[in-house]
Image: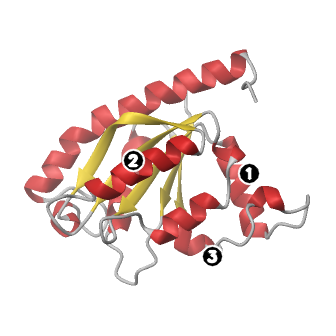
């Protein structure tokens, strides 16, 4: 059964390398028969957080925010693709995520991190784990960490070199872990309403 997965990416830089990883994940999940959409924070262009979606009166939120809220609510799971900025989170992805709250509840999330260096964004992934949990998502145990990103994936998101082959070997477990939790969450949501 096909599920709806959103792959969220947040770099605003002009020479974005992480988009390669986002494309690799979209392609890989589609190859597994999933309905996948890339959500690019830069393309959506939400302003710095002033009001969350829930703080607007019905019909008054900006159109881009309303459209994204609808997509988040309709999704069965999420993949957050995050670069590491000075040992921390990507500000564009964090800003996009913080515009919503209840829309994320009761769904699994997976984290794929990257950097130009050998630590592959691991510190950003660690920071995201607590944040996503606090926002009501179940964060799956499998993660992907890619680095150096420029040597692991071609411009069209295809694995290259040793780092790319390592990523290709790690992807099936990552995807299967996410999809197991997606199915468990769908079944649970269908059986009973969330407790609050």
Residue 110 in which image quadrant = top left
Counting labels gives 3
Disc 3: CA contacts within 10 A as few (<14), some (14-19) or many (>=20): few
Picture colour scheme: secondary structure
Residue 155 in which image quadrant = bottom left
Q: CA distance from mark 1 to mark 3?
A: 20 Å
For the C terminus, the quadrant is top right
Is residue 111 or residue 171 the one in the foreground? 111
Of the two numbered discs 2 and 1 on the same chain, state the one appearing first in sequence.
1
Secondary element under disc 1, as helix, strand or loop, is helix
What residue sits right under mark 2 in the picture?
A: 111
Residue 186 in sight in this render: yes
Q: CA distance from mark 3 to mark 2?
A: 23 Å
Q: Are marks 1 and 3 in contact (CB under 8 Å)?
A: no
Provide residue 122's location: percent of width, then percent of height: 27, 54
Of the two numbered discs 3 and 2 on the same chain, state the one appearing first in sequence.
3
What residue sits right under mark 1 in the picture?
A: 70
Is residue 143 or residue 151 the one in the foreground? 143
Of the two numbered discs 1 and 3 on the same chain, state the one appearing first in sequence.
3
What residue sits right under mark 3 in the picture?
A: 48
Q: CA distance from mark 2 to mark 1?
A: 22 Å
Is residue 146 or residue 135 the one in the foreground? 135
From the image, state whether disc 2 or disc 1 is nearer to you: 2
The residue lying at 42 percent from left, 67 percent from top is: 90
Q: Residue furthest toward the left?
A: 162
Disc 1: CA contacts within 10 A as few (<14), some (14-19) or many (>=20): few
Q: Residue furthest toward the top?
A: 191
Provide residue 15's location: percent of width, then percent of height: 34, 81
């Amino acid at each position: 059964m096909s599920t709806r997965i959103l792959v969220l990416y947040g770099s605003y830089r002009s020479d974005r390398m992480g988009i390669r990883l986002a494309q690799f994940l979209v392609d890989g999940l589609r190859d597994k028969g999933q309905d996948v959409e890339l959500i690019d924070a830069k393309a959506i262009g939400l302003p710095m957080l002033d009001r969350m979606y829930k703080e607007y009166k019905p019909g008054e939120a900006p159109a881009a925010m309303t459209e994204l809220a609808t997509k988040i609510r309709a999704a069965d799971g999420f993949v957050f693709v995050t670069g590491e900025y000075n040992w921390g989170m990507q500000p564009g992805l964090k800003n996009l995520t913080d515009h919503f709250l209840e829309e994320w509840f009761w769904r699994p999330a997976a984290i794929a991190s990257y950097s130009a260096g050998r630590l592959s964004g691991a510190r950003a992934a660690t920071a995201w784990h607590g944040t996503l949990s606090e926002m009501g998502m179940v964060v799956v145990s499998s993660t992907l960490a890619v680095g150096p990103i420029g040597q692991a994936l071609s411009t069209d998101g295809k694995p290259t070199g040793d780092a790319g082959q390592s990523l290709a070997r790690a992807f099936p477990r990552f995807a299967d872990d996410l999809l197991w939790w997606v199915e468990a969450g769908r079944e649970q949501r269908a059986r009973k309403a969330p407790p609050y």
